[in-house]
Image (spheres, coloured by chain):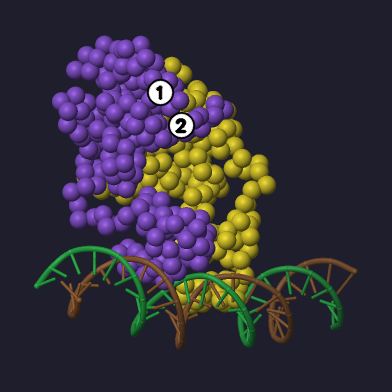
Chain colours: A purple, B yellow, C green, D brown
Amino acid sequence: MFKKVLIAEDMEDINKGVHSLLTELGVAHIRQVQYCDDAYLKIKRGVLDNEPFELLITDLSFKADHRSQKYPSGEALVEKLKSEFPTLKVIVYSVEDRLQPVRNLFNKHGIDAYVCKSRAGLKNLTTAIDKVFSGATFLSDEVSNAFNSTNELEIDDYDISLLDNLSKGLSQEEISALYKENHITPASLSSIEKRLNKLRIQFNAHNAIHLVAIVKDLGLI
Amino acid sequence: MFKKVLIAEDMEDINKGVHSLLTELGVAHIRQVQYCDDAYLKIKRGVLDNEPFELLITDLSFKADHRSQKYPSGEALVEKLKSEFPTLKVIVYSVEDRLQPVRNLFNKHGIDAYVCKSRAGLKNLTTAIDKVFSGATFLSDEVSNAFNSTNELEIDDYDISLLDNLSKGLSQEEISALYKENHITPASLSSIEKRLNKLRIQFNAHNAIHLVAIVKDLGLI
DNA sequence: TCCCCCCTTACGGTTACCCGTAAGGGCTTT
DNA sequence: AAAGCCCTTACGGGTAACCGTAAGGGGGGA
């Protein structure tokens, strides 16, 4: 079993619950932090001291308070850690059950497991820890169809960028100008129109407003 | 102090944390449920047995699972309970920190306190319980400007309906037709345009898409 | 009662969006 | 090298959205 594990979670009770779970599993060294920045510092220090953490269990959303944070969310923290310390195992433990954010965590940041906080949360977390320790990955049932599905996987980064800019109030012409400026292709108004039309069909949206509302609900933007 | 309290919360660890807090406060009868429907049944039974619960502490979001629920959310539960048992005190304990949902809970459903789950969550919950016991209300700091502010309180139900229909993909003309059908006034296309224009200005939105994106983020719809 | 204000509605002009068609260019296939 | 395909871009017509102006209508106050 893991010997040295870090828990990052701002809510005290949950933090405590995970801690006692790890104790039961026989983890010797457990550290807890309530801020992402502290998590990064502890991980870094562990490496410098040649006593690196083997596993990070982290939440996604951390409530902001008076302390300004370099890493405001679990996602930002994971992105940084996985790029700097690729051997560190990471389990994300969060209430988020939309598929796209989960997909991103695996595909872009390379996390090892995703566990949904729910009634069976701690039980799933146990399974996840076992799996990750044995080198496998784990995904909660709630979000298991994030990959195996015939889902909206033909949505690429360009589409996301398009939808994101739309949701920020840019007109299609402004987006076209922006893309031309940044050498993003396709940049023509016509191509943007075509792509948005494709997205409208895919998501069964009546118009652009509807489309943005739908993808916001899905968590794509 | 309260003698009989019900906790509705689907996550086990939090449920446990709140339970131990109540024990420390000297509450004799504490019951816990993980489903809204169970909460309703327990409250109802308490009344029928002439041993009513005095206080309900409930979460807002309950993860759906195999059990189909009549009351899918804390909000639905509270709405029902407060209309059927007005003397029951209700404290909502949730991570939700958007102002509009909190406002709705107070204004439409008449809850007695709102506590944000956060680092200081349990401490605030203690304060809330004291306040509510003495007949007062309580509001977490995180959402304290839900009322005292010079906020977007000039947004009425008509505006919300308008934005909601927009986000569902209806064109302004379709909304006009819908309102005429349902005798909602103003229903003319011109008035709808004017109202949306006012909303765009209020929210600093560049266009309708931007507006819908903003109010979705705020939790108004 | 009359006047005034505000809300609702109507209308016209400009812009942005939606949609089909078609031309140009790069890549692969034969 | 020619043909074919796909992606990008351009253009034009129709529609919805945006914006200003102005007329109608009801309620409150003088």
Instruction: Name the residue nearer the viewer: A87 or A153.
Output: A87
Closer to the camera in the image, D14 or B92: D14
The residue carrying mark 1 is: A39
Q: What type is the residue that disc 1 sits on? A: Ala
Query: How many residues crowd mark 2 within 10 Å: few (<14), some (14–19), many (20+)?
Result: some
**Left or right placement of residue B94 versus residue B204 in this view:** left
Would residue A177 appear left or right of B69 to someone viewing this image? right
Identify the image quadrant of residue B158.
bottom right
* Chain designation of label 2: A
**Measured along the vertical axis of the image, is residue A157 above or below residue A53?**
below
Q: Residue at x 62, y 52 (%)?
A: B153
User: Nearest the camera: A47 or A200?
Assistant: A47
Residue A113: image location, x then y, percent: 25, 33
Residue B31 shown left or right of residue B189 in the figure: left
- The spot of residue A103 in percent (x, y) is 29, 44
Chain where mark 1 sits:
A
Identify the residue position indicated by label 2 in the image: A71
Occupied quadrant, residue B61: top left
Callouts 2 and 1 close, C-beta under 8 Å: yes
Label whose residue precedes the other's in the sequence (2 or 1): 1
Q: Secondary structure at mark 1?
A: helix
Q: Residues within 10 Å of mark 1 (few under 14, many from 20)?
A: many
Taking A215 as reference, is A47 above or below it?
above
Q: Is residue A200 visible?
A: no
Where residue B86 sits: x, y (%)? 49, 43
Element assignment for label 2:
loop
Q: From this viewpoint, is residue A41 visible?
A: yes
Amino acid on which the number 2 mark rests in the picture: Tyr
Measuring from the top left, give residue A33's x and y in whole percent: 41, 21
Residue at image coords 37%, 45%? B73
Q: Distance between the Cα atoms at labels 2 and 1?
A: 10 Å
